[in-house]
C-alpha cells in the first residue's frame, strides 16, 4: 500500500471481498483485482477506495492498459462481470450496453436486427466497450460515421466518491444539461468509471466493396486523395498505408448493388493511370496489424487531411535508422509504428517522434505514444499537449476526483 | 413572433455606478457601450419574450481582448454576464442577469479563415449561420446545422445551444461540426479547446462547451467543419390520414436501412397555419410527411423509389416529389415558417421542444390529444420525426382569463410526458430559463450535482449566465409554473410594470 493508503492490503482485500464476493476478488501482484457485479457495487468499491486513499485503475480486458503514463494502482477495478447488452431498442436505433461487454459481443447482439455501432476499434474480440470509450479509439469508418463523440448519446458513470450519475439519455437528439459523456470519452479512467453506455446505431452496411491503389511515391496520392473527398462518392472508409518503400491507398464504397459500377467508374477517373485492384476486406485490419510487433513504438498522430501524404513522404525521405509503418485514415488520424535495432546510445525513435511532433504542432496536430517499444536510451514523452486549457483540465480532475484516486498520473499533464 | 406573455415582468434595476461604467467604456470604447434605458430594452429578452430583465449595461466588443477585458471587469466586481448573439433563442438563454452585463457578440462577425482542402472554417461568434454556407457554397460545400432561424441566428448562439435543425438526422448537431473553440473563461483567461484536426489531446472540452448555454464562458472563435454539398437532393411530400400513419412510414424507412437527411411531420393544424402564412401548397391531410434524401444521384433515385413504395404501403393518399429547386424551397419555407405561422390561427401559442424515442410517437400523440382536449386547448404538432423531436405548439388566447396558465401547465406536462416515455425535455431549444425546473424532472440530484462539478471547475463564482439551465435550489420541490416572484421584487429593489 502507498503512503496515502490508510489501511493494510489484507484489510483492503477483506473489504473488497465483502463488496464483490470472494470469487471475484483476488490478489494480482502488488494489486487487488476486484470485479463488481453491478453499478451499485462499483460505487461501493470506489467509495471504499476513496475513503482509504487507494488508487484505482478501471479495466476491461486490458488491451489498452499500457496506453497513457504507467500507473501501478492498489486496485484494478475489472468490468468483466458487467458484460451484457442491456437494451436494444432496434426500432429507435439505440442500445444500452454495460461497459465490460466486448465490442464483438455487442455487435453480434445488434446484428440480430441488422444494426451496428458504426465504429471499427482495435481488437473487437477482446476490447470492451468501456475501454474503447475511455481511450476514444476509432478506425477507418470514422470518415463516414464520426467518432465516439458522435455515436454516444448517454452514459452511466460512477465518480470517485461513489456517486452514480446519468448523463445524456436514450434519444439521439437531446440538449438537456451538460454532455458529461463527451468529457468521459477519452478520459482514460481519470474522471470516473464508465458503467453503461448508450449508443445511437446505424444499419449494418449491406453492400460494400473495397479497392486498392498502389504507388512507390506517397505524393502521387495527394491530389487523388483530395479529389476523392471532394467527389460525389458513397465513401465508407479510406486509408493510406505505408511501409518501407511501398505505399497503398485503400478505399471502401458502401452503396446499393445497382450503384457500384457508376461509383467504381468515378473512382477510376480520379486515380487516372494508377492501377485499381479490388481489395479483400482484410486491408481494413492494417491498423491493428501494426500492433503485432510487440517491440515497436506505436503512436497516434493527429493531422490535417491535407498533410497525410506529405507526412508519409517525410518518413520515406528520412534516414533508415528507424523503420516506419503507418496507416493513416482519410480523417487525418494516423497510427504509426516505429522500430529500431537494439543498439547502444541514443534512442533513434525519440528523434523520429519529436520531429513528427514539431512537424504537426504548428497546425494544431499532436502525437501521442500508445505503445512504448523497448529501445535503450531516452524514451519520448507519452502525451503531447501544449494546450492553454491544461489548467482547466486539472481543475476538472480536481473537482471530480479530489483525492486523485482514479488512474492518478495516467493522463496528459500528469492528470 | 407571437409569444406568451405570462406576467410581462420587467425588473427596473439601479444603473451601474459611474466608475464601473467608465471601466466598461475603457474596455470596449464609447461606441461599444449601451447604458441608456431606452436602448437597453432591446436586450431585455430573447425569442422567449415572457421573461424580461433589463440589463445593467450592454457591451458590443469587437475583439477577443475586449471580451476578456469585460469578463475581467465582471470578475473583479462580481457582476454576472450573459453573452448574446442574435437573440433568437426560444428558451430564455440570453435573458439578462439582474443588474448584469450583456455581452453582445454581434460586432464580432468576421469569417477569419476558409480552408477548403481541410474542410474547415474559422469564424467569430457573431457570424450568421447562413453566411457560413454562403461563403463556401461556390466551392461546393455547406455548413450542415440549419436551425429554422438560420438566416438571422449566430454561430455563437448555435454553439451555446448546440443547435440542430431539420437536417441533423443525417448530419448531426452543432457539436458534430465544431472542431475547435477559443473561449474567454469566466475568470477572463483565454483557453483553446480542440484543434482543426480530430482528437486533440486532453479532455474533450469543446464537446462539453457546445450546448452549455453560455454557462461556461464566451466563445470568441469557432472552428467549424464544412461538408461537401451532395450531388442530388430530392424532397418528397406524402399525405396521410393521421400523424401516426406518417410516423409508421418513418419507422419503416428507418427499418429499411435508410438515413434520409430530413424526415418531418406536420399535423392538420400545422398545415393549416403554414398554408395561411406562406401558401406552401401542402396537401390538406391529417399527417403530412416530408422526406428529403441526398447523396450521389443514382443512389438517391433508387432510395426515392423505395420511399414511395413504403409511403404507398402505409396508405399515402398523395405523393409528390419536388420537381425544381423552387418547389423544394417552397416546401421548406412552409415547414420553417410553421412556428411563426401559428399566429395566423391562434392569438397566442407556446412552442415546446420535447424528444421521445421514435417508437413512442403514436402513444405520445394520443396522450397529447387526450391532455389537450381535457383542458379544451388545441395543440398543433410539427416534428423532426426521424429523431423524435416534437414541437407541440399549445394554442391559446391570453385575453381569456386563466387560459395562459392552463396552456403553460399543459406545455410542461407534455415535457414530463416525453421524459416518462424515455425522452428528453429539449432536443434543440435548450433549457435556458424556461425549462430549469423541468431539468430536475429529467435528471436526478446526483446527475445534476455531477454537472455542477463541471460548472464549478469553469466558473466557481457562477458569473457566466447564472441562474439558467439548472433548477433553482429554492424551487427544487416546487411544481414548475409560469411565474415566481424574484427576490429583488419581493424586497422592493425592483418593480413590476
Image: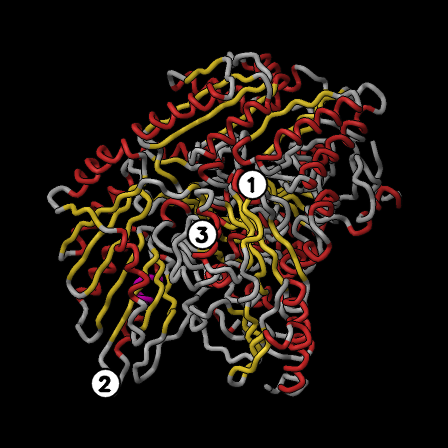
Q: Residues within 10 Å of mark 1 (few under 14, many from 20)?
A: many
Tell me residue B331's x, y (percent): 48, 19
| Quadrant of res B437 | top right
Using the rendered image of the protein, determine whether residue B77 is visible from the camera's viewpoint.
Answer: no
- How far apart marks 2 and 1 lie (CA) works out to 55 Å
Regarding mark 1 in the picture, which secondary structure is present there? loop
Q: Image point 35% across, 32% down: which residue?
A: B295
- Is the residue B293 above or below the residue A370 in the image? above
| Front in this rendered view, residue B449 or B23 | B449
B135 with respect to A34 (left or right): left
Queried whether the magenta region covers residue B422, the answer comes back as: no
Q: Which residue is mark 1?
A: A173
- How far apart marks 3 and 1 lie (CA) works out to 23 Å
Q: Which residue is mark 2?
A: A343
- Is the residue A101 above or below the residue B85 in the image? below
Q: Which residue is mark 3?
A: A107
Q: Which of the chains bears the disc numbered 1?
A: A
Q: Which of the chains bears the disc numbered 2?
A: A
- How far apart marks 3 and 2 lie (CA) works out to 44 Å
Labels 2, 1: one chain: yes
For marks 3 and 1, the one nearer the N-term is 3
Q: Image point 23% across, 32% down: which residue?
A: A262
Tell me the magenta residue range: A356-361
Tell me residue B207's x, y (percent): 52, 52
Using the rendered image of the protein, determine whether residue B315 is visible from the camera's viewpoint.
Answer: yes
For marks 3 and 2, the one nearer the N-term is 3
Labels 3, 2: one chain: yes
Q: Please tell me whether mark 3 or mark 2 is closer to you in this view.
A: 3
Amino acid at each position: 500500500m502507498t503512503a496515502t493508503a490508510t489501511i493494510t492490503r489484507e484489510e483492503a482485500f477483506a473489504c473488497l471481498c465483502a463488496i464483490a464476493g470472494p470469487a471475484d476478488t483476488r490478489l494480482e501482484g502488488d494489486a487487488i483485482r476486484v470485479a463488481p457485479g453491478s453499478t451499485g457495487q462499483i460505487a461501493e468499491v470506489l467509495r471504499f477506495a476513496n475513503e482509504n486513499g487507494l488508487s484505482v485503475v478501471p479495466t476491461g480486458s486490458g488491451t489498452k492498459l499500457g496506453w497513457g503514463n504507467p500507473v501501478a494502482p492498489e486496485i484494478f477495478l475489472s468490468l468483466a462481470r458487467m458484460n451484457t447488452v442491456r437494451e436494444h431498442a432496434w426500432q429507435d436505433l439505440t442500445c444500452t450496453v454495460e461497459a465490460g461487454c466486448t465490442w464483438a459481443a455487442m455487435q453480434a447482439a445488434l446484428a440480430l436486427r441488422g444494426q451496428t455501432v458504426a465504429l471499427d476499434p482495435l481488437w473487437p474480440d477482446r476490447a470492451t466497450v468501456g475501454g474503447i470509450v475511455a481511450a476514444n479509439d476509432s478506425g477507418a469508418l470514422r470518415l463516414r460515421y464520426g467518432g465516439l463523440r458522435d455515436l454516444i448519446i448517454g452514459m452511466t458513470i460512477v465518480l470517485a466518491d461513489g456517486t452514480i450519475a446519468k448523463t445524456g439519455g436514450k434519444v439521439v437528439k437531446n440538449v438537456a444539461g451538460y454532455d458529461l459523456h463527451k468529457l468521459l470519452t477519452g478520459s482514460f479512467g481519470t474522471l470516473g468509471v464508465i458503467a453503461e453506455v448508450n449508443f445511437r446505431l446505424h444499419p449494418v452496411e449491406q453492400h460494400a466493396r473495397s479497392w486498392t491503389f498502389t504507388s512507390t511515391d506517397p505524393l502521387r496520392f495527394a491530389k487523388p486523395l483530395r479529389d476523392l473527398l471532394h467527389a460525389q462518392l458513397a465513401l465508407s472508409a479510406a486509408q493510406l498505408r505505408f511501409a518501407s518503400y511501398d505505399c497503398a491507398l485503400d478505399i471502401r464504397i458502401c452503396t446499393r448493388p445497382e450503384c457500384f459500377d457508376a461509383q467504381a467508374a468515378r473512382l477510376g477517373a480520379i486515380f487516372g493511370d494508377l492501377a485499381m485492384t479490388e481489395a479483400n476486406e482484410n486491408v481494413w485490419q492494417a491498423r491493428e496489424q501494426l500492433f503485432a510487433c510487440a517491440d515497436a513504438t506505436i503512436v497516434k498522430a493527429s493531422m490535417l487531411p491535407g498533410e497525410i501524404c506529405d507526412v508519409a513522404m517525410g518518413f520515406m525521405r528520412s534516414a533508415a535508422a528507424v523503420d516506419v509503418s503507418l496507416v493513416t485514415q482519410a480523417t487525418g488520424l494516423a497510427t504509426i509504428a516505429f522500430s529500431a535495432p537494439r543498439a547502444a546510445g541514443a534512442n533513434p525513435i525519440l528523434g523520429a517522434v519529436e520531429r513528427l511532433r514539431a512537424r504537426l504542432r504548428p497546425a494544431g496536430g499532436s502525437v501521442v505514444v500508445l505503445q512504448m517499444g523497448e529501445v535503450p536510451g531516452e524514451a519520448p514523452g507519452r502525451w503531447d499537449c501544449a494546450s492553454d486549457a491544461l489548467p482547466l483540465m486539472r481543475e476538472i480532475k480536481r473537482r471530480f476526483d479530489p483525492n486523485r484516486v482514479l488512474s492518478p498520473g495516467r493522463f496528459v499533464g500528469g492528470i | 413572433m407571437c409569444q406568451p406573455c405570462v406576467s410581462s415582468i420587467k425588473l427596473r434595476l439601479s444603473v451601474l455606478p459611474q466608475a464601473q461604467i467608465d471601466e466598461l467604456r475603457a474596455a470596449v470604447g464609447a461606441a461599444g457601450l449601451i447604458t441608456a434605458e431606452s436602448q437597453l430594452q432591446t436586450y431585455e429578452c430573447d425569442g422567449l419574450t415572457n421573461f424580461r430583465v433589463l440589463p445593467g449595461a450592454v457591451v458590443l466588443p469587437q475583439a477577443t481582448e475586449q471580451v476578456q477585458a469585460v469578463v475581467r471587469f465582471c470578475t473583479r466586481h462580481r457582476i454576472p454576464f450573459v453573452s448574446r448573439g442574435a437573440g433568437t433563442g426560444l428558451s430564455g438563454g440570453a435573458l439578462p442577469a439582474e443588474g448584469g452585463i450583456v455581452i453582445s457578440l454581434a460586432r464580432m462577425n468576421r469569417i477569419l479563415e476558409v480552408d477548403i482542402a481541410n474542410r474547415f472554417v474559422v469564424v467569430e461568434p457573431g457570424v450568421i449561420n447562413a453566411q457560413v454556407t454562403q461563403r463556401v457554397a461556390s466551392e461546393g460545400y455547406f455548413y450542415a446545422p440549419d436551425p429554422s432561424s438560420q438566416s438571422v441566428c449566430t454561430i455563437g448562439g448555435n454553439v451555446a445551444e448546440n443547435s440542430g435543425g431539420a437536417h441533423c438526422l443525417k448530419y448531426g448537431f452543432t457539436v458534430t461540426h465544431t472542431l475547435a473553440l477559443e473561449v474567454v473563461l469566466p475568470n477572463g483567461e483565454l483557453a483553446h479547446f480542440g484543434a482543426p484536426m480530430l482528437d486533440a489531446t486532453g479532455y474533450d472540452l469543446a464537446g462539453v462547451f457546445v450546448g452549455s448555454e453560455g454557462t461556461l464562458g464566451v466563445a470568441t472563435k469557432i472552428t467549424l467543419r464544412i461538408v461537401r454539398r451532395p450531388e442530388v437532393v430530392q424532397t418528397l411530400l406524402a399525405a396521410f390520414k393521421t400523424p401516426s400513419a406518417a410516423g409508421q412510414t418513418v419507422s419503416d424507412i428507418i427499418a429499411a436501412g435508410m438515413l434520409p437527411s430530413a424526415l418531418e411531420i406536420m399535423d392538420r393544424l400545422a398545415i393549416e397555419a403554414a398554408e395561411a402564412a406562406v401558401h406552401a401548397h401542402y396537401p390538406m391531410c391529417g399527417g403530412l410527411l416530408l422526406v428529403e434524401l441526398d447523396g450521389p444521384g443514382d443512389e438517391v433515385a433508387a432510395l426515392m423509389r423505395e420511399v414511395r413504395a413504403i409511403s404507398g404501403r402505409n396508405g399515402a393518399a398523395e405523393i409528390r416529389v419536388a420537381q425544381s429547386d423552387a418547389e423544394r424551397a417552397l416546401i421548406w419555407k412552409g415547414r420553417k415558417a410553421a412556428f411563426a405561422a401559428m399566429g395566423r390561427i391562434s392569438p397566442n401559442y407556446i412552442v415546446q421542444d420535447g424528444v421521445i424515442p421514435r417508437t413512442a410517437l403514436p402513444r405520445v400523440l394520443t396522450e397529447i390529444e387526450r391532455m389537450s382536449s381535457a383542458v379544451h386547448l388545441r395543440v398543433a404538432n410539427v416534428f423532426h420525426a426521424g429523431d423524435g423531436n416534437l414541437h407541440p405548439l399549445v394554442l391559446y388566447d391570453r385575453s381569456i382569463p386563466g387560459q395562459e396558465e392552463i396552456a403553460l401547465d399543459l406545455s410542461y406536462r407534455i415535457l414530463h410526458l416525453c421524459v416518462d416515455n424515455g425522452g428528453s425535455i429539449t432536443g434543440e431549444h435548450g433549457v435556458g430559463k424556461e425549462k430549469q425546473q423541468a431539468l430536475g424532472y429529467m435528471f436526478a440530484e446526483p446527475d445534476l450535482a455531477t454537472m455542477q462539478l463541471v460548472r464549478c471547475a469553469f466558473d466557481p463564482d457562477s458569473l457566466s449566465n447564472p441562474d439558467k439551465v439548472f433548477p433553482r435550489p429554492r424551487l427544487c420541490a416546487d411544481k414548475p409554473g409560469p411565474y415566481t416572484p424574484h427576490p429583488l421584487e419581493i424586497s422592493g429593489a425592483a418593480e413590476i410594470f
